[in-house]
Amino acid sequence: MLPALTPTTEFFWTSGADGRLRILRCADCGRFVHPPGPVCRWCLSPNVAPTVVSGRGSVFTFTVNVQQWSERLSEPYVVAIVELEEEPGLRLLTNIVECAPDAVAIGMPVEVSFEAAEDVFLPRFRPAS
Ligand code: ZN
């Protein structure tokens, strides 16, 4: 199942159209805000806007799924929380791809790799080159 696009989240799910990852950033306190919301989660400012980030980070934690919950997914696959290099605590729930599940490790450097699916670009992460 693909994510539903809303005015708040559309930029995030379509950002990969140009191969770049975008995260909301607050113009007042400078911190990143994820998941996207109408105001900054740190200072409650409404001055948040999508900002291009490096797409680089590291595996914060992960698990390997062996149950095929969807026809789109072929098990086993890795569900991970990746922390982006821009800010401590800036984390995304994602998948690790282009890597054997047994080779994934906490702290492993990764970079974004988009998977186009209908009108969205799913941000996944692969081992950093
Ligand atoms: Zn703020």
Image (spheres, rainbow, N blue to C red):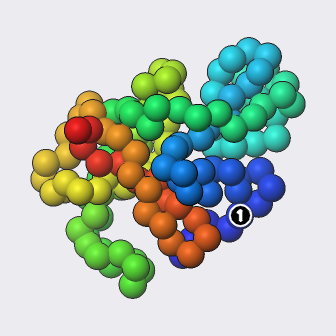
- Work out which quarter of the rendered image holds the C terminus and state it: top left
Name the residue carrying label 1.
5
Residue at left 26%, top 72%?
Answer: 75
- Residue furthest bottom as drawn: 71
Residue at left 80%, top 56%?
Answer: 7
Compared across the picture, whether 54 is left or right of 75 comes to right
Q: Is residue 35 visible?
A: yes
Residue 25 rendering spot, x and y as whole percentages:
68, 29
Q: Using the image, determine if residue 106 lies above or below residue 20.
A: above
Compared across the picture, whether 5 is left or right of 79 comes to right
Residue 108 rendering spot, x and y as whole percentages:
24, 35
Residue at left 35%, top 75%?
Answer: 73
Residue 115 rendering spot, x and y as whole percentages:
43, 63
Q: Using the image, determine if residue 97 lies above or below residue 48.
A: below
- The image quadrant of residue 46 is top right
Q: Using the image, determine if residue 81 lies above or below residue 68.
A: above
Residue 14 versus residue 75: which sits nearer the camera?
A: 14
Label 1 sits on a secondary structure element that is loop
Residue type of the residue flagged with mark 1: Leu
Compared across the picture, whether 27 is left or right of 102 comes to right
